[in-house]
C-alpha cells in the first residue's frame, strides 16, 4: 500500500481497528483507506461485520482499539455535537432503507432538510423534487413507505441520503433482495450519483458481480481481517484462496461450509447414546 | 393523514375538555364554590373530650354549616383539646358568649361542632375563643352509665 | 445450587443495570423537553395519538365505573338509611382513587403499549439508527415529544374519567334509584374538599402519567429489535406500569390521606 503521499486524497483512513461484541472478535486489526471521489466496495460473507464497519465509520459504535479518521477527524474521539456536524455530511443507506413509516415519500426526503435548515417551504419542495427526480421517483412522492416496493424504498432512501448534498454515502447491501431490473437501476444510480455529485461512495455488499462492475477499489474482509485488496481486475486475477473462493462463489474452501463446532459423527453418536439411555 | 390544522383543533378541544372536567369537579363536586376557607376567620374552643371530631369536620349554627374545623391541638397544662374553627366571613356576627357543643349526626354519623349564639352585643373576632363548651358524648360512656343506672334501678326494685 | 445462586445474582445485576439505564435514559429525555417546546407541532401530533385516541375508552369506562359505584353504594348505604350520602361515596371513590388509578391502568393498556410497540418497531426497522446517522437525535425528535404528550394527557384523561364517573353515579343514583337530587349534590359538596381530595387525585395522576410514559418509552427504546423483542417489551410495559401504578398509589395514598 502506498504511503502518506496521497493523504489528502484519502477521505476515510482506518488503522489497526479492533472491535468485539461480547467475547466475539469482529475486527482484529483492519487497515483500509477510502479515496475521495471513488466508489470503494467492502465485501465479505454475511456476518463478517460489514454493517458494523459502517456504523464504526458513522460513529454509532466505538472501536476497542485503533483509529478511524473521516476527513481528518478522529471519529471515536469526537464530541457529540462535532459528530453530528460530521454526520450531516455523510449519507447512509441502511440495509432496510430505514424510511420513516408514518410519513410519505416527500416528507421522508424532506426530513433531513427540515431538521437541519430553515429553508422556506417552497425551496424545500424544489429540493425534494430535485432529489426525487434524480432517483426517478418524483411522481411517487405521495406514496407511503408501505406502498413502495423494496427497490423503490431503497431509491427513496437514496434520495434522502443525498438530500443535504453529503460528501460521502455509505451503502449497506444496496443490492440484496432486488430483482434484476431494480438491481441494474441501483447499480447505475450509485455510479451516476457518485460521478455527477462528486461524492465518495462506500458500498458494502456480498454481491460480487454487481459490485465489481461499479467499484474502483475493493476490500475483501474475512474473520476480522482484510484478506484481499485491489481493483476488480486485480482481485479477479488473484491467487489467494480466500479471495478466489469468495469472488467465484465456491461453496467450500478456506471458508468452511459448516459452522465450526463438533464433528457430525460425534453428534450422531451422542444422539444414539441418549436414545439408548432413554 | 390529518392535516396539522385539524390536529391542532382536535387536541385543543381535548385539552379544553380536560380543563372543563376539572372545573366541574371544582364547582359541582367539591366545596370550592360554597366555602373556600380563605376569607373566613378562626376562633378556638377548648373541650374536655372531642370524641371522634376530626380536622375538616363541619361547624354549624342552627343546623346551617358556617365553617369547618381547621386544627385540633392539645393543651399540655390543662389537658384539654384545643379546637380551631375556620368560620366563613359571611357569618361574622357570632356573639362572644356563643357556646359550642360536639354532636353526632345520626347514630353512626360523623361528629360536628354546633355553635349556639348567646346574647352579647360584641362579636367574636379572628382568634377569639368560645368559652362555653360541651364535650362530645362518647357512646361507650353513655351506654356504661345507662347499664349502671339500670343495674341500680334493678337493685331497688328487688 | 451455586449455579442457581449465580443465576439469581446475574438476574439481579441485570435488573439493576436496566434500572440504571432507565434513569440515564430519563435524564436524556428530560434534556430533550425544551426542544419539544420549541417545536410545538411535534407535541400536538403526539397528543393526538396518545391522548385524544385514548379518550373514548376513558369516557366509556368512567361512565360504567361511576354507574357501578352508584349501584353498589346505594345498596350498602340504604341499609343505614344513609343513601343521601351516595354522592359523597361516588365522588370520593372516583377523585381520590378510581379516577387516577383506573384511568392510568387503561392508559397503560391503550397508549403505553402502543408507544412501546411504535418505538420498538422504529428501532427494529433501523428508523432510530437512521435518524442518528442523519444527525437527528432520536431521543429529542421521537421520544421526548411522546413522553411529554403522555405526561400531559394522563392527568387530563383521569380528570375526565372522574367527572364522567360522577355523572354516571348521578344517573344511576338519582335517575334510576330515586336518591334526592339536591341531597346528592349538596352532601357531595359538603364532604369533598377541592385541595384535599380533588387536587391530591390530580397529583396522583400526574405522578402516574410520568411513570407510565417513562416505562412505555424506555421499554420501546431499550427493546431487543426483533418482533419477539418488541412483543415482550409491549407486555412488560403493561405489567410494569400496572405494578408501578398500584404500588405508587399505596405510597401516595398513605402520604396524602393516611396517618401512617
Ligand atoms: N447488536 C448486536 N449485538 C450483538 N452482536 C451483534 C449485533 N449486531 C451484530 N452482531 C454480530 O456482529 C456480527 C457482524 O454483524 P454485521 O456487521 O451485521 O455483519 P454483516 O453486515 O457483515 O452481515 C454478526 O455475527 C452479528 O451476530
Ligand atoms: Mg449487514
Image (cartoon, coloured by chain):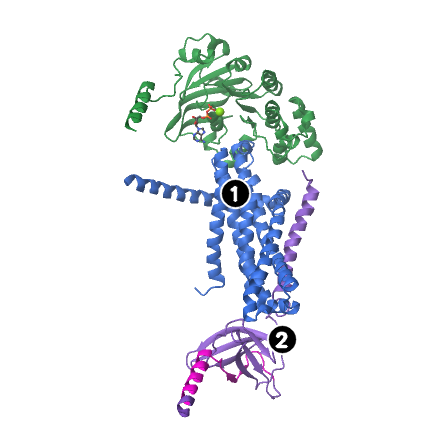
Chain colours: A green, B purple, C blue
> Distance from label 1 to label 2 (Cα)?
50 Å
Determine if the C-beta at disc 1 is less than 8 A from ligand 1.
Answer: no
Q: Which residues are magenta?
A: B123-152
Q: Quadrant of the C terminus of chain C?
A: bottom left
Subunit that carries the residue with mark 1? C
In-front residue for pair C177/C18: C177
In-front residue for pair C8/C83: C83
Determine if the C-beta at disc 2 is less than 8 A from ligand 1.
Answer: no
- For residue C209, say whether it is visible: no
Q: Neighbour class for label 1 at 10 Å: few (<14), some, many (≥20)?
A: many
Subunit that carries the residue with mark 2? B
Numbered mark located on residue A60 in the image: none
- For residue A141, say whether it is visible: yes
Identify the element where label 2 is drawn.
loop
Identify the element where label 1 is drawn.
helix
From the viewer's perspective, is B4 left or right of C106? Answer: right
x 46%, y 57%: residue = C251
Is residue C201 found inside the magenta-colored segment of the image? no
- The quarter of the picture where residue C175 lies is bottom right
Mark 1 lies on residue: C217
Foreground disc of the pair 1, 2: 1
- The quarter of the picture where residue A181 lies is top right
Numbered mark located on residue B89 in the image: 2
For residue A54, above or below residue C34? above
Amino acid at each position: 500500500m502506498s504511503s502518506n503521499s496521497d493523504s489528502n486524497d484519502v477521505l476515510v483512513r482506518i488503522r489497526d481497528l479492533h472491535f468485539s461484541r461480547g467475547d466475539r472478535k469482529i475486527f482484529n486489526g483492519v487497515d483500509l483507506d477510502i479515496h475521495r471521489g471513488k466508489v470503494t466496495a467492502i465485501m465479505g460473507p454475511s456476518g463478517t461485520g460489514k454493517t458494523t464497519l459502517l456504523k464504526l465509520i458513522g460513529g454509532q459504535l466505538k472501536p476497542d482499539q485503533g483509529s478511524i479518521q473521516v476527513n481528518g477527524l478522529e471519529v471515536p474521539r469526537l464530541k457529540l455535537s462535532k459528530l453530528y456536524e460530521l454526520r450531516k455530511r455523510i449519507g447512509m443507506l441502511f440495509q432496510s432503507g430505514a424510511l420513516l413509516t408514518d410519513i410519505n415519500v416527500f416528507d421522508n426526503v424532506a426530513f433531513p432538510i427540515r431538521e437541519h435548515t430553515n429553508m422556506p417551504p417552497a425551496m424545500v419542495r424544489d429540493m425534494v423534487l430535485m432529489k426525487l427526480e434524480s432517483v426517478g421517483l418524483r411522481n411517487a412522492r405521495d406514496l407511503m413507505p408501505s406502498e413502495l416496493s423494496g427497490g423503490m424504498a431503497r431509491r427513496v432512501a437514496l434520495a434522502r441520503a443525498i438530500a443535504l448534498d453529503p460528501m460521502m454515502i455509505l451503502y449497506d447491501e444496496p443490492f440484496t433482495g432486488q430483482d434484476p431490473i431494480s438491481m441494474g437501476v441501483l447499480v447505475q444510480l450509485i455510479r451516476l450519483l457518485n460521478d455527477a455529485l462528486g461524492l465518495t461512495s462506500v458500498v458494502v455488499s456480498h454481491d460480487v458481480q454487481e459490485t465489481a462492475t461499479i467499484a474502483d477499489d475493493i476490500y475483501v474482509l474475512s474473520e476480522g481481517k482484510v484478506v484481499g485488496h485491489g481493483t476488480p481486475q486485480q482481485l479477479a486475477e488473484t491467487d489467494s484462496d480466500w479471495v478466489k473462493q469468495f469472488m467465484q462463489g465456491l461453496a467450500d474452501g478456506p471458508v468452511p461450509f459448516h459452522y465450526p463446532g463438533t464433528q457430525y459423527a460425534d453428534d450422531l453418536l451422542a444422539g444414539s447414546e441418549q436414545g439408548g439411555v432413554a | 393523514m390529518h392535516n396539522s390544522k385539524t390536529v391542532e383543533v382536535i387536541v385543543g378541544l381535548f385539552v379544553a375538555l380536560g380543563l372543563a372536567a376539572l372545573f366541574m369537579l371544582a364547582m359541582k363536586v367539591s366545596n370550592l364554590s360554597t366555602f373556600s376557607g380563605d376569607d373566613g376567620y378562626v376562633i378556638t374552643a377548648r373541650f374536655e373530650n372531642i370524641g371522634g371530631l376530626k380536622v375538616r369536620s363541619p361547624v354549624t349554627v342552627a343546623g346551617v354549616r358556617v365553617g369547618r374545623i381547621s386544627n385540633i391541638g392539645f393543651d399540655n397544662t390543662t389537658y384539654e383539646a384545643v379546637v380551631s374553627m375556620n368560620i366563613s366571613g359571611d357569618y361574622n356576627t357570632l356573639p362572644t358568649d356563643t357556646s359550642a357543643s360536639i354532636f353526632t349526626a345520626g347514630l353512626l354519623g360523623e361528629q360536628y361542632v354546633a355553635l349556639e349564639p348567646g346574647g352579647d352585643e360584641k362579636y367574636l373576632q379572628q382568634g377569639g375563643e368560645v368559652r362555653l363548651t360541651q364535650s362530645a358524648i362518647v357512646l361507650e360512656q353513655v351506654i356504661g352509665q345507662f347499664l349502671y343506672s339500670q343495674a341500680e334501678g334493678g337493685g331497688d326494685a328487688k | 445450587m451455586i449455579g442457581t445462586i449465580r443465576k439469581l445474582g446475574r438476574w439481579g445485576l441485570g435488573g439493576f443495570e436496566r434500572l440504571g439505564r432507565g434513569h440515564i435514559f430519563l435524564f436524556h429525555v428530560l434534556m430533550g423537553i425544551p426542544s419539544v417546546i420549541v417545536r410545538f407541532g411535534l407535541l400536538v401530533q403526539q397528543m393526538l395519538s396518545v391522548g385524544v385516541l385514548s379518550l373514548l375508552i376513558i369516557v366509556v369506562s368512567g361512565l360504567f365505573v361511576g354507574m357501578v359505584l352508584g349501584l353498589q353504594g346505594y345498596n350498602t348505604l340504604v341499609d343505614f338509611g344513609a343513601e343521601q350520602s351516595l354522592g359523597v361515596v361516588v365522588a370520593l371513590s372516583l377523585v381520590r382513587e378510581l379516577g387516577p388509578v383506573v384511568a392510568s391502568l387503561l392508559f397503560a393498556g391503550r397508549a403505553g403499549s402502543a408507544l412501546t410497540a411504535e418505538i420498538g418497531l422504529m428501532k427494529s426497522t433501523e428508523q432510530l439508527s437512521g435518524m442518528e446517522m442523519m444527525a437527528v437525535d432520536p431521543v429529542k425528535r421521537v421520544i421526548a415529544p411522546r413522553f411529554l404528550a403522555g405526561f400531559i394527557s394522563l392527568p387530563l384523561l383521569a380528570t375526565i374519567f372522574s367527572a364522567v364517573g360522577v355523572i354516571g353515579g348521578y344517573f344511576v343514583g338519582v335517575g334510576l334509584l330515586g336518591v334526592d337530587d339536591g341531597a346528592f349534590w349538596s352532601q357531595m359538596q359538603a364532604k369533598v374538599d377541592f385541595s384535599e381530595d380533588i387536587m391530591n387525585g390530580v397529583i396522583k395522576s400526574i405522578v402516574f402519567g410520568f411513570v407510565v410514559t417513562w416505562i412505555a418509552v424506555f421499554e420501546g427504546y431499550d427493546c431487543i429489535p426483533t418482533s419477539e423483542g418488541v412483543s415482550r417489551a409491549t407486555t412488560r410495559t403493561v405489567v410494569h406500569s400496572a405494578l408501578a401504578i398500584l404500588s405508587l398509589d399505596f405510597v401516595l395514598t398513605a402520604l396524602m390521606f393516611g396517618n401512617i
